[in-house]
């Protein structure tokens, strides 16, 4: 083999290993077997590899990382490349000393380079003193040239590069391209796309190419999308959910189905997707939807009015609206969240009547005439069918047929039944054993799974505000769900925490579930999200300890000064299994000790725990009646107690009797009638209830119904308790006097006068 053939073969081997991300092939080709010595032909730098003495350290000095970003982008925009750390200028192994991994490396580069580019970092030939060979594997780009997303730090008044600049590898050096130079290079290397962005591109129809070979139906979301497209009251089906759950797949299926049925005269499809995750890594895409103008142009193209595209924006929008008003049109707008142009949202919020739209996004941004359809993970059955469908999609996935059902289910569970994660894991494997080894990384991310997590969550996480990030950080520390209050405490009572929780639920990043023990919602993260966020927490020294310390102090009620009250609050916060009866007992204990505020919180919690508990409602009503003297709240609680009262017996009588007592002095026009009704229900439940009988007689007296007073009170005229007799006789005297029955009025007056001193009676008994 002559020298030229040797170098051609060498470069071809390295280029193939870079494309395949085959670190073993690279090491075997560049280094002597089991040695840190470079092979012949590799003691030089080329357009495919570069050597550096050490990897930059993580610090506030970003200049070394800007230099590295220049090389990374230069390799990426050429053919891809390898940056080897730990090799001196004399091409000798000295060893890399910086403790770093793929995630930390990409975190530092992310200051200058888009998340469309992921760099794998490998540690090879680790020595006893922990020095090692660092290998950064940079994937090649497509026709699109990647740019710097921010300026490099200034050194002596100059920056290495500016936002919008780019870089390219030529020979053994990396060169910065100005924005103009990058534009020219991108234009010169532009080439026809392989395949078509559209599955259907004919006349009045544009349907995006599906990202699936075999569609796996999902009964619930499919039916909901179909209902929305046929519902005249709704204009937009908004598919929302975290990245990778299949929003685009479902929307594409629905759009194609509408085409097959000829449900619309025109179909316009656009995507703002600028990257995708493949088995070889994150690949940059050229989005079709970049601005409001591109949306209008796409509509005009489908309507076959290309000449209108030359008009100014205002006239163009007016023409498009006129066209839409008279036709049956379906708009499919994919990845709406990645578009910054708010005019697109405004356009969708004001669609002409009859126009339908399907949008996909992380959260609902369109607000008018929209039906949000939350797309969650696959069901167990859907996940199994999805895995099996991949075997027929690509030849290298035939090994899936060898997987048992339990293995398929294990893969689905490890991937949280997220289609993108499942497909990525299976595509990265070649055998069942490879797959089972890879899914183990997903729970405790290793270098294999970091790229998946970054693709799914990095862009979303970085777009959140501080309160939203803190909510995720707190939840990432715990497997068990937390209450709103606990999350807020973990966040340090940061302003906006409650709104942040709601926003995270809306984004489908936080899962809300009903806790029957608490009779309230609690919040948690799915494991893949937790894996990503926990690594973010680990980046901040002491953050995990601070969060856990706040919650320990809160659960131990160290914020409560009174020792006795602290015991109650501590028990309340820690006992997830506390029943409403336990809480009620604690509330009554706090009330007896004069701790009105604590008692009120406990009464409230007891009633929230079991809203159908008449005991809690009645006890809380009495607290409001006698301690807070809040008649309005007392009546509300008695209404709740009455609605859940026993169907018969003394407890029912007690509730309605006391309700009547409060109602008779409520001071509204119907108070007498309502109180009377309540007393009569009490008497029906317990005819021997003397207090209820007296209450009803008093209400009858108010209404001037003296015969009813007589019927209720005459049986009590000779009651053994003198106070009871006195009250009954008093009512009877007045009733017979009004009826002009002088004989009976005098007789009952004599009996009343004979009572000299009242004995203790039921009227003197304090409230139960």
Image: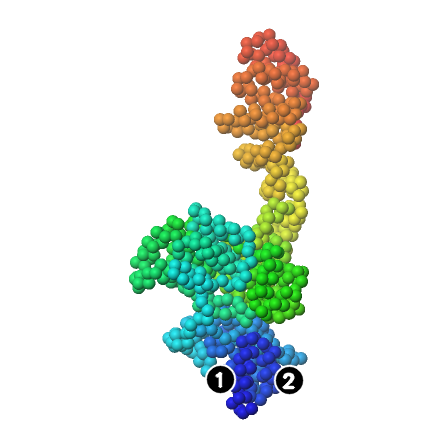
Q: Nearer the viewer, mark 2 or mark 1?
A: 2
User: Residue 457: where, in percent of width, then height?
Assistant: 53, 63
Q: Residue at x 48, y 67 (%)?
A: 275
Question: Which image quadrant for residue 656?
Answer: top right
Name the spot of residue 19 as percent of width and height, x first.
Answer: 54, 76
Residue closest to the eye, 752 or 199: 199
Q: Is residue 386 above or below residue 686?
A: below
Q: Does 510 appear above or below 764?
A: below
Looking at the rendered image, the quarter that the N terminus falls into is: bottom right
Q: CA distance from mark 2 to mark 1?
A: 25 Å
Q: Position of residue 353 (x, y in %)?
A: 38, 49
Q: Secondary structure at mark 2?
A: loop
Judge the density around disc 2: few (<14), some (14-19), many (≥20) Cα neighbours within 10 Å: few
Residue at image mark 2? 33
Residue highlighted by disc 1: 172
Q: Is residue 551 visible?
A: no
Residue 13 visible here: yes
């Amino acid at each position: 083999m002559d020298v030229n053939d040797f170098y051609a073969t060498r470069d071809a081997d390295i280029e193939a290993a870079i494309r395949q991300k085959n670190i073993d092939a690279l090491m075997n080709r560049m280094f002597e077997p089991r040695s840190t010595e470079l092979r012949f032909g590799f003691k030089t730098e080329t357009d495919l590899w570069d050597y550096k003495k050490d990897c930059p350290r993580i610090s506030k000095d970003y200049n070394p990382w800007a230099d590295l970003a220049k090389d990374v982008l230069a390799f990426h925009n050429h053919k891809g490349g390898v940056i080897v750390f730990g090799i001196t200028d004399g091409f000798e192994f000295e060893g890399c000393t910086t403790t770093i991994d793929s995630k930390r490396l990409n975190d530092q580069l992310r200051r200058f380079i888009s998340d469309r580019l992921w760099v794998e970092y490998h540690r090879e030939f680790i020595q006893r003193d922990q020095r090692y060979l660092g290998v950064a594997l940079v994937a090649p780009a497509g026709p699109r040239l990647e740019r710097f997303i921010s300026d490099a730090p200034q050194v002596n008044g100059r920056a290495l590069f500016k936002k919008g600049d780019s870089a390219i590898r030529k020979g053994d050096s990396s060169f910065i391209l100005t924005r103009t130079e990058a534009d020219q290079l991108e234009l010169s290397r532009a080439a026809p796309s392989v395949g078509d962005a559209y599955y259907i591109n004919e006349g009045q129809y544009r349907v995006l190419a599906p990202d699936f070979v075999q569609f796996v139906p999902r009964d619930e979301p499919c039916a909901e999308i179909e209902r929305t497209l046929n519902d005249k009251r709704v204009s937009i089906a908004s598919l929302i959910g975290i990245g990778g759950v299949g929003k685009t797949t479902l929307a594409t299926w629905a759009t194609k189905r509408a085409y097959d049925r000829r449900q619309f005269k025109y179909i316009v499809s656009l995507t703002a997707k600028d990257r995708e995750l493949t088995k070889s890594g994150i690949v940059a895409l050229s989005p079709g939807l970049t601005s409001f103008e591109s949306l209008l142009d796409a509509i005009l193209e489908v309507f076959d009015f290309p000449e209108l595209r030359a008009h100014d924006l205002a006239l163009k929008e007016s023409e498009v609206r006129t066209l839409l008003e008279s036709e049956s049109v379906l708009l499919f707008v994919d990845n709406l969240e990645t578009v910054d142009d708010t005019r697109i949202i405004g356009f969708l919020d004001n669609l002409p009547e009859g126009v339908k739209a399907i949008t996909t996004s992380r959260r609902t941004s369109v607000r008018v005439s929209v039906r949000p359809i939350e797309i969650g993970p696959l069901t167990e059955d859907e996940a199994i069918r999805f895995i099996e469908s991949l075997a027929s999609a690509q030849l290298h996935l035939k090994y899936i047929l060898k997987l048992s059902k339990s293995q398929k289910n294990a893969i689905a569970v490890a991937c949280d039944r997220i289609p993108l994660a499942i497909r990525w894991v299976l595509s990265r494997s070649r055998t069942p054993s490879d797959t089972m080894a890879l899914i183990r990384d997903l729970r405790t991310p290793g270098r294999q799974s970091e790229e998946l997590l970054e693709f799914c969550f990095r862009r979303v996480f970085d777009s959140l505000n501080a309160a939203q990030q803190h909510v995720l950080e707190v939840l990432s520390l715990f497997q068990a769900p937390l209450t709103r209050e606990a999350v807020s405490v973990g966040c340090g009572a940061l302003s906006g925490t409650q709104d942040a929780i709601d926003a995270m639920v809306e984004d489908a990043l936080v899962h809300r579930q009903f806790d029957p023990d608490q009779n309230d919602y609690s919040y948690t993260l799915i494991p893949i999200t937790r894996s990503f966020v926990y690594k973010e927490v680990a980046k901040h020294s002491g953050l995990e300890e601070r969060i856990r310390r706040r919650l320990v102090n809160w659960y131990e009620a160290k914020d409560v000064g009174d020792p006795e009250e602290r015991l109650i609050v501590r028990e309340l916060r820690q006992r997830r299994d506390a029943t409403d009866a336990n809480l009620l007992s604690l509330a009554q204990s706090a009330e007896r000790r004069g701790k009105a505020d604590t008692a009120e919180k406990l009464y409230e919690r007891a009633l929230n725990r079991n809203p159908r508990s008449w005991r809690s409602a009645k006890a809380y009503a009495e607290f409001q009646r006698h301690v807070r003297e809040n008649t309005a709240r007392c009546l509300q609680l008695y209404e709740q107690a009455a609605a859940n009262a026993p169907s018969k017996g003394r407890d029912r009588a007690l509730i309605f009797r006391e309700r009547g007592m409060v109602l008779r002095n409520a001071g509204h026009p119907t108070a007498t009638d309502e109180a009377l009704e309540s007393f009569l229900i009490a008497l029906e439940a317990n005819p021997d209830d003397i207090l209820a009988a007296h209450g009803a007689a008093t209400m009858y007296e108010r209404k001037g119904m003296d015969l009813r007073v007589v019927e209720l009170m005459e049986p009590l005229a000779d009651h053994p308790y003198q106070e009871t007799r006195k009250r009954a006789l008093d009512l009877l005297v007045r009733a017979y006097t009004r009826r002009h029955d002088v004989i009976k009025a005098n007789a009952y007056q004599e009996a009343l006068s004979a009572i000299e001193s009242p004995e203790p009676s039921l009227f003197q008994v304090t409230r139960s």
